[in-house]
Image (cartoon, grey):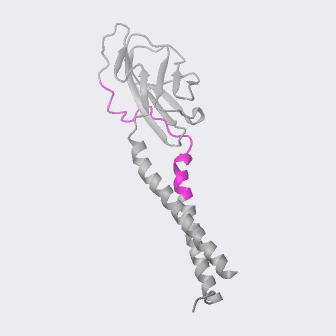
Amino acid sequence: MRFVRTKVLVRLGCVLVLVGSLVFGGAAVSTPARAHVEPVASSSPEHRSVVTELETITITFTGATRPDFATYTLRSADQRDHGLAAPVHEDDGTVVMLTPEQELPDGLYRVAYQIMFDDGHAASGVIQFELSADGVARAGEWPDSDPAPARPEPERADVGGLLPWLIGVAAVGLAAFTVVLVRARRRTSGPGPGQT
């Protein structure tokens, strides 16, 4: 009976080691690939474009996002933050529409976003544009005194992205515990049936 239990525990340990290896391997392969994916498919206004009027800013992301895990800010080149109405999300959070609370004067602006995709990984970025009533660009470059303008701080940790690692650590820990348990039982029970 003890020999049968030992065999079951050994097999269980092997399965756990295999699961841990697959999880770690998958996380190691997928994380760099996701890190290089551009989160924004398109936006209106386009990045570094000049627009004559602006009512709504529309951003289309490359995948479904979690609206409850998203933050958006609007800042002008004079380092003033401008209020935004509650974001409107469509198509599973793929499309978001942002409306300034007040009419914006001519100038250079940046919209910053901090989002989380459905697969758990977070992304952030900035879309810059100039508002000019006659369509002529006059704003110049963004001031060096504001190197990371309107970059929102993440409100929640990227728990989803850590989940594969946590599962892998748990699997490896269980496998190690199983191996230790099997060795301890072998020492206390002596050789199994058919063994010398």
Farthest residue, direction bottom: 196
Residue 169, located in which quarter of the rendered image?
bottom right
185 over 173 or under it: above or below: below
Q: Nearer the viewer, residue 153 or 11?
A: 11
Q: Indicate yes or no whether the magenta region holds residue 155.
A: yes
Q: Main secondary structure of the magenta part?
A: loop
Look at 30% across and 25% down and name the residue there: 141
Q: Nearer the viewer, residue 80 or 53?
A: 53
Please say whether residue 108 is visible from this viewpoint: yes
Magenta region, residue range: 141-167
| Spot occupied by residue 113 in the image (x, y as percentages of width and height) | 47, 32
Farthest residue, direction right: 1
On the rendered image, what quadrant is the C terminus found in?
bottom right
Q: Nearer the viewer, residue 161 or 49?
A: 161
54 over 91 or under it: above or below: above
Q: Indicate yes or no whether the magenta region holds residue 86.
A: no
Look at 37% across and 33% down and name the residue there: 146
| Spot occupied by residue 166 in the image (x, y as percentages of width and height) | 55, 57
Count of residue discs: 0
Farthest residue, direction front: 194
Look at 70% across and 81% down and name the residue there: 1
